[in-house]
């Protein structure tokens, strides 16, 4: 019998050489040095095979702290930013069970969220990108995810309220439709801004209204209206 630990599939998942456990650990050390403190978030990043979310030709760069192209002029976010945004979502005073993600892309951020929340709802406007992620994620064992090919500006009305909403593309202003879909104590983490630069914002729904914090300067692809069904 083949020991499952040594089957070709799990070897690919664990990675070799530039995608090995040691290379991954180095990335985690770096994230810690840069100020990520949530050990649960760090351990999920350590366990998630980022090299399997990108083109094989780029796999050797998977554990560098950089954004990489994923096709359709889109990018997989830089690990530091993924860790930072995830940390913000889970820092709230409530238990974060339901999370909405706008911008599935290759599904890497989705995989991270699915290991920390009870259920993840993810929306992507480009159908072909989401179709790939929708195949990849369950193959890697991430199953507590619902997918929608749609326009994230509308949120996901039938599944609201969400304890966390994470947006991985930048609009010019905070969409009110999204803040309206937060549960009390829930947080929206979103890059906002156009040509003059973007900043992360954290918007928390309180008993009285909304609390808003401006955070790090960031660079995301723009959040665009409408969906592409191909
Ligand atoms: N989290 C993804 C990031 C992908 S880049 C990853 O790590 O792979 C941002 C994604 O947001 C792109 O795939 C883009 O198509 C998508 N996007 C942009 N505007 C959108 C909108 N209005 N609704 C849903 N997705 C959107």
Image (tube, helix red, strand yellow):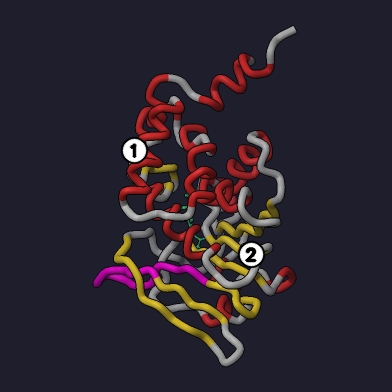
Where does residue 159 sit, x and y in percent of width and height?
72, 69
142 sits left or right of 203 in the view: right
Mark 2 element type: loop
Image point (38%, 59%), residue name = 221
**Secondary structure beneath disc 1?**
loop
Residue 189 on the magenta span = yes
Q: Could you tell me residue 38's position as x and y percent?
A: 48, 54
Q: CA distance from mark 2 to mark 1?
A: 29 Å
Residue at image mark 1: 64
| Extreme residue toward the bottom, this view | 208
Do we see residue 230 in this rendering? no
Q: Estimate how packed mark 1 is, as few (under 14), some (14 to 19) or many (20 or more) residues with alpha carbons within 10 Å.
A: some
Disc with the residue nearer the chain's start (2 vs 1): 1
Question: Residue 96 at what x, y percent from top left?
Answer: 63, 64
Residue visible at 50% across and 58% down? 86
Residue 27 found in image quarter: top left
User: Which x, y percent locates residue 227?
Assistant: 56, 62
Image quarter hosting the N terminus: top right
- Please state the extent of the stretch shown in magenta in the rendering: 188-200
The residue lying at 38 percent from left, 51 percent from top is: 80
Q: Which residue corresponds to the image point at 60% horizontal and 59% vertical from the top-left?
A: 123
Q: Is mark 2 within 8 Å of ligand 1?
A: no
Front one among 82 and 30: 30
Q: Which residue is mark 2?
A: 96
Q: Is residue 26 above or below residue 78?
A: above
């Amino acid at each position: 019998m083949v020991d499952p630990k040594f089957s070709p599939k799990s070897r690919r998942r664990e990675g070799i050489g530039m995608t090995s456990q040691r290379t991954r650990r180095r990335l985690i050390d770096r994230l810690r040095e840069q100020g990520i403190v949530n050990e649960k978030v760090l351990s999920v990043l350590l366990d998630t095979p980022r090299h399997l979310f990108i083109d094989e030709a780029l796999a050797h760069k998977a554990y560098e702290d950089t954004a990489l192209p994923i096709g359709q002029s889109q990018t997989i976010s830089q690990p530091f930013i993924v860790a930072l945004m995830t940390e913000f979502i889970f820092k709230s005073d409530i238990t974060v069970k339901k999370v909405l993600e706008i911008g599935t892309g290759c599904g890497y951020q989705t995989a991270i969220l699915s290991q920390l929340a009870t259920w993840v709802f993810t929306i992507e406007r480009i159908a072909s990108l989401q179709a790939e992620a929708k195949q990849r994620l369950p193959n890697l064992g991430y199953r507590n995810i619902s997918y929608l090919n749609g326009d994230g500006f509308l949120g996901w009305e039938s599944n609201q309220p969400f304890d966390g909403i994470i947006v991985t593309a930048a609009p010019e202003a905070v969409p009110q439709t999204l803040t309206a879909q937060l549960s009390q104590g829930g947080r929206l983490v979103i890059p906002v801004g156009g040509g003059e630069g973007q900043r992360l914002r954290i918007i928390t729904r309180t008993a009285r209204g909304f609390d808003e914090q401006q955070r790090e300067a960031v660079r995301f692809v723009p959040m665009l209206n409408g969906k592409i069904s191909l």
